[in-house]
Amino acid sequence: MTTRPTLGRLWELYGRARAEAAGLRAAGRRGPGLRRAERRADQLRDRLVVNYSPLVKYVAGRMAARIPGGVDQEELISWGVVGLLQAVETFDPSRGAKFETYAISKIRWAILDELRKADPLPRRVRRRVRETQRATGTLTQTLRRVPTEAEVAREVGVGLAEHRETLERHHRVRTWSLEEILSGMGEGGRELSLSDPAAETSELRERLAEAIESLSERERVVITFYYYQGLTLREIGRALNLTEGRISQILRRAILRLRDRLSGV
């Protein structure tokens, strides 16, 4: 009677199968031996994916509860499986990290990538947002300060109420994206341990506001322009007279500082 291998043993067998296939490819041996090794590695990988599949449902369920406008959880799960597959294929057990933490990060980012591609804003709203972004960038350069809502609305040619409605719809999507990035489920983060998604989101927003206040003035401006006013990196660079690459560096540094602050580092 054969016994099922433990997860540790499964990882060991998978690592050996991958190494064998890689060795055969490196040696230029493309025959039946390589195909057998690759098939064996794929079978072991798929078994690992099945073992860890509850992680996908866990992440998808938590994200579905917080996405503005709602989304089919089954669709989130299908995107999350791609992330889990990537996690299994890229995880290195020798580094001593916990696979579950690594996998949750990969699953979350795979879902976020697909959500960004899906673009939840209607085309008309997206077009108006682009007009607002261009107007904000132009006025910021001209006035040498952040323009008021009324000034941007006049530049775009709409009423203040319509302008605010457009900003609010865009703000909800971008703020949710920032909250997801900073929600502490990355490799080095620690998630908020609250059972109620609404309470979790409320606490995260309060802590996020406090964390943003701790940033330098330039970091706060970049975070505000990018996530709350919807400007692109290039537009922010023009407004601040900095290169797009420099704005990207400031944004990444600010996000890392926010994550550290939110995770209590």
Image (tube, grey):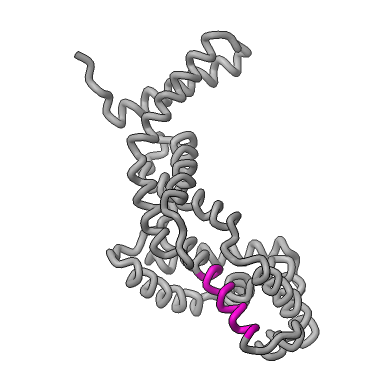
Residue occupying the far right of the picture: 142
Magenta extent: 162-175
Residue under the point 48% across and 34% down: 89
- Can residue 116 be seen here? The reply is yes
Location of the N terminus by quadrant is top left
Q: Is 170 inside the magenta-drawn segment? A: yes
Give above or below for 238 relative to 191.
below
Compared to residue 36, the image places residue 210 above or below, namely: below
* Image point (73%, 74%), residue name: 131
Residue drawn 45% across the image and 46% down it = 80
Q: Is residue 211 left or right of residue 57?
A: right
The reply to whether the magenta stretch includes residue 103 is: no
**Residue that protrudes farthest toward the left in the picture:** 1
Quick check: 252 above or below 94? below
Asked whether residue 259 is in view, the answer is: no
Left/right of residue 142 with respect to residue 159 in the rendered view = right
Of residues 258 and 59, the one nearer the viewer is: 59
Picture mark count: 0
| Residue 260 locus on image (x, y percent) | 44, 64
Residue 154 position, x and y percent, is 74, 88
